[in-house]
Amino acid sequence: MTMGDYQDVTLQMAMERYLSEIGGQLSPKSLTRSERLARTLLKGLGGDQLIGSITPLALSSYRDRRLKSASAATVEKDFIFLSELFNKAITEWQIGLEVNPVSSLGKTSRSHGRNRRLRRGEQVRLLAACDQHINPFVGWVVRLSLETAMRKSEILLLKKTDIDLEKRVVVVPKSQNKAPRPVPLTQVAVAIFADIFAKSTPPEDTKLIFYGELGRYATRRPYSIDTVFRRVLLTARMKEFQFGDLRFEAISRMREAGLSELEIIAIAGTRAIRGRRLPQQQIKALIKRLDVLGVGLVGDKQAMLYKTKREPENLAPDASRHGKTRAKPASRGSFGVAVGIRSR
């Protein structure tokens, strides 16, 4: 492809070249997502469409059709991908286009994202429903999400070597933003991890803390919590809630406790607030700040408020418990909110 020959270049040809050039820079998951976006765009715009004939009017028509079956956020991802393709074609391939047609479109109106928070009594019901499940992984993962604001994937991929309880730090090796991120732990989060280490020992074939069953090819993947969590929500009468809302709840509590936006960015690794992140060496200062503000504590700051009566045991992903259980209200957790009901 050289200057002036864009009259013969179809969208299919441009898309194939673009995917081949960026494929080596992407993870397998990201490459699969990019290929899926490419198929959607080729189907909607037409693969045999000449790249020079793709005008803002044609893109606007595609957007209107796409919005009938997809959310505004999804359609926006389509156009981000297409815009990057055109930018590469203009700057690197020397395609003779004067302007990126996507840049002429206005931004697709979209919602401000989910803002669902836990209402009165819901945390008690949610954690009680988690503790009723035969696998304690469910309750541990949910509690850690509320205490650390970590993403679900970040929690499920944790290994014991990523956690330093003495320094009260978890190092997320690969977050959504790609760079490793240290996460300071509240005292309640430290107690949760200590409980996990005391009562769950991973099998020899994996280092994952939250491991799944042995697969067909003798490999273990992270524990699959999605289906289980949906059942838990039905039990807790919280059908409209989502796992990602736990992270939003944790971040909201940090704001309410007095943490600054830059401190929240450093802890949660979110891009919601644009600004420079705090240096990683300030992690000790963040831990002190969490303690001063009482994050994870209520009342006597010398007391660990995560308590459980479970006996130590090696836990398989779906190991059953025998006998009846009697529910007992537990102590309070982050920001003075009850952490739920534990079984004994």
Image: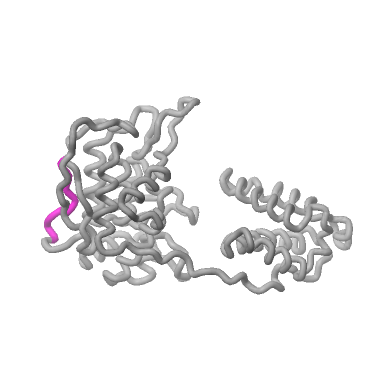
Which of 192/321 is in front? 321
Q: Quadrant of residue 318?
A: top left
Q: By what rule are the colours in the image chosen?
A: one colour
Which of 236/181 is in front? 236
Q: Which residues are drawn in magenta? A: 301-309
The residue positioned 78% from the left and 51% from the top of the image is 12
Residue 62, can we see it? yes
Answer with left or right where residue 334 lies relative to residue 202: left
Q: Is residue 146 magenta?
A: no
Q: Quadrant of residue 65?
A: bottom right
Q: Position of residue 213 (x, y in %)?
A: 40, 31
Answer with left or right where residue 295 lies relative to residue 268: left
Image quarter where the N terminus lies is bottom right
Q: Is residue 304 magenta?
A: yes
Answer with left or right where residue 153 lies relative to residue 250: right
Q: Position of residue 243 (x, y in %)?
A: 39, 53
The residue positioned 26% from the left and 64% from the top of the image is 120
The residue positioned 36% from the left and 65% from the top of the image is 264
Is the residue 305 above or below the residue 314 in the image?
A: below
The residue positioned 39% from the left and 48% from the top of the image is 230
Count of residue discs: 0
